[in-house]
Image (cartoon, rainbow, N blue to C red):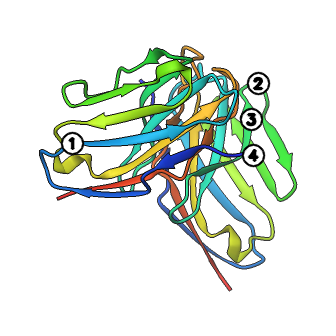
């Protein structure tokens, strides 16, 4: 089946690095995504990684993919108070239809 | 470029009443998705349209939920009759094509069923 699991809460100090972890079950997923949701807002795509890659870097964001362990992580360098939000991991699932399967979200709290 | 528009932003109804939500995708986007996000959970796909045809509605509770996308542009999602457990945020997203395309999300409609 298709399932995505995330830890629920992470608290860091401003300027530190944040690492948000995710595990997924569908090994046939072609893409894995990280979305950000601020209070009262929709989801904003942060970054994504193709399943044949093991790392992708985009400015302050680094995505690591361990396909053997079905583990995905998002590292945010120099975390700012504006990074406080809920972060969702999502997999594209089987069938390549565009359907996304989301985790339950990790709330990131950044303390000044 | 205008984003995905949704209305209303908030709705409060009593159980057994009906409610409808509207979504206008980004211009030119062929694929439209409706997700349900219950508090504390990630979004769950309810229905996916490709133009005006349904691609996936396997998780849509068809005894009470219905959706349409006439002319392959705007879409409406209806709940009739509503239950308490339907309280959630209903998110609409669109993408240019199906797979491998970024989905752009609207701000959502927050529904509270009393």
User: On what subunit does the disc labeled 3 rest?
Assistant: A
Which of the numbered marks, if any, corresponds to residue A63? 4
Residue B34 rendering spot, x and y as whole percentages: 45, 35
Residue underneath mark 1? B18
Residue A55 shows in this picture: yes
Residue underneath mark 3? A49
Q: CA distance from mark 1 to mark 3?
A: 40 Å
User: On what subunit does the disc labeled 2 rest?
Assistant: A
Few, some or many C-alpha atoms within 10 Å of disc 4 (few <14, some 14-19, many ≥20)?
many
Q: Are marks 1 and 2 on the same chain?
A: no
Residue underneath mark 2? A52
Residue B84 is left or right of residue B107, and the answer is left
Residue B52 is left or right of residue B81, and the answer is right
User: On what subunit does the disc labeled 1 rest?
Assistant: B
Secondary structure state at the residue bearing disc 3:
strand
Secondary structure state at the residue bearing disc 4:
strand
Secondary structure state at the residue bearing disc 1:
loop
Q: Nearer the viewer, residue B90 or B4?
A: B4
The first of marks 3 and 4 along the sequence is 3
For image coordinates 38% across by 21% down, the residue present is B57
Q: Quadrant of residue A47?
A: top right
Query: Residues at badges 3 and 4 in contact (C-beta under 8 Å)?
Result: yes
């Amino acid at each position: 089946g298709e399932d995505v699991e995330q830890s629920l809460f992470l608290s860091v100090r401003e300027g530190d690095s944040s690492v948000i972890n995710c595990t997924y079950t569908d090994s046939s997923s072609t893409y894995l995504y990280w979305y950000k949701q601020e209070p009262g807002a929709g989801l904003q795509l942060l970054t994504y990684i193709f399943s044949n890659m093991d790392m992708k870097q985009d400015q302050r964001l680094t995505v690591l993919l361990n396909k053997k362990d079905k583990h995905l992580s998002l590292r945010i360098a120099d975390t700012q108070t504006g990074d406080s939000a809920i972060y969702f991991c999502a997999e594209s699932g089987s069938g390549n239809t565009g359907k996304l399967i989301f985790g339950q979200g990790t709330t990131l709290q950044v303390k000044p | 470029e205008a984003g995905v528009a949704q209305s209303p932003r908030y709705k409060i109804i009593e159980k057994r009443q009906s409610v409808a939500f509207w979504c206008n995708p980004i211009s030119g986007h062929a694929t439209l998705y409706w997700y349900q996000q219950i508090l504390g959970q990630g979004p769950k796909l309810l229905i996916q349209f490709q133009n005006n045809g349904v691609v996936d509605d396997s998780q849509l509770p068809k005894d009470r939920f219905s959706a349409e996308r006439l002319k392959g542009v705007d879409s409406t999602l209806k709940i009739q009759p509503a239950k308490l457990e339907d309280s959630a945020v209903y998110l609409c997203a669109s993408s240019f094509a199906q797979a491998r395309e970024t989905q752009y999300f609207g701000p959502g409609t927050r529904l509270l069923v009393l």
